[in-house]
Image (cartoon, rainbow, N blue to C red):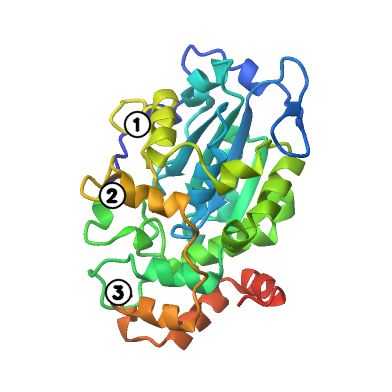
Amino acid sequence: EPAEHTGNSNANAENENVDVADALKPFEKPICSLDGKGKTEKEGNRVMRVFIAAAQASGSTLLAYLMGQNEDSAAVLDMGVRQNMPALSYFEKATRDPKIKDIVVKASIRGISHTPKVWIKHIQQQYNPDYSILFLRNPIDTMLHLLTHIGVGTKTVPSEAKFRSCDKSDFQEFSYGLRCGTPAGKLKALNDLFKNAESDFQRVITYEDLCLNRTLVVRHLNEDGYCIPLYSFNQPKYSIIDVMKKGFYYFPSSHDPKGLFWGAGHLMNSFHHKKTGEVHSESHAFGECPGIPGEETREQMMKEVGSPYSDWTLQQIRDLAIESAPDIAKYYSDRGML
């Protein structure tokens, strides 16, 4: 993640002189056509608010990007893990635009010490989502990706108590793997959300299905009232830059006093990576997903794992991932994918 700005207290303040009655009106789920190209909905239906919860480095920004292909959608692709969900007034511009029918917001889970139930309840109170998705990835691969982004400032296995802080000044030397919790703590928190998914989420979507079975993912989205055609997932019309520019129009960036830090996560783009440019960017999104890692690929990833895990074996990392997220691990094991 790029450097974040946390001076967004106004974004989380109570709505000031803003009439959000329309935003709080009851929402009736649309009925999508079989091909996802059309939908039938109640006249005067308000904007549909979509929320995606995921672990960092799990590939979930790709889902937000693909859902943002609808011309009547606006997306916050990847809200910084330190950011709190802003009040509904933050989304007012998109809510009041008749051209916008869906708002998509993706946020990363914090460590277990932040109490996942409290975290998700805060989001529900602030954003009042109509459709919530829990995004999963094989916990071994999620753990490996997080461990390649912990920085070099720790020589011992980090404790959740030390790294629970979301204050920027507390971890200047560390990368995002240790922001607001440890890798193990974040997987534990995700596991807690997964155990209670039926009460807080309408759908669980996996990175593996997004890569290998987009037809299934699109079918589920359409069944749930988020209408989108399959070709939008297989051959995206809008680039990452397009989706971000549209998002910034409706949702102030961190440079705005009432803004919120958000970006494109691992979908590199020229906003944050001037040297890579759009060619590298679009190859991530328009091309095929990276292959689902096998043991050889995971061993290669081990070379990038930071201290103090750099001396660990892949089996130790595997054990830590399964211990941290046993229910998610069982879910993948039952599918023959662990």
Circle 2 crowding by C-alpha within 10 Å: few under 14, some 14–19, many from 20: some
Say which of 110 and 317 sits in front.
317
Q: Nearer the viewer, mark 2 or mark 1?
A: 1
At x 57%, y 48%, the residue is 234
Q: Quadrant of residue 246?
A: top left
Above/below status of 270 relative to 87: below
Above/below status of 184 relative to 35: below
* Disc on the earlier residue, 3 or 1: 1
The residue indicated by pointer 1 is: 253
At x 68%, y 70%, the residue is 331
Mark sitting on residue 168:
2
Percent of width and height locating residue 256: 31, 26
- Badge 2 marks a residue whose secondary structure is helix
Left/right of residue 81 with respect to residue 94 in the rendered view: left
Amino acid type at mark 2: Lys
Amino acid type at mark 3: Gly
- Residue 90 in view of the camera: yes
- Badge 1 marks a residue whose secondary structure is loop
Q: How many marks?
A: 3
Percent of width and height locating residue 222: 72, 41
Mark sitting on residue 8:
none
At x 22%, y 61%, the residue is 173
Cα gap from disc 2 to disc 1, whole angstroms: 18 Å
Cα gap from disc 2 to disc 3, whole angstroms: 20 Å
Cα gap from disc 3 to disc 1, whole angstroms: 31 Å
Above/below status of 27 relative to 55: above
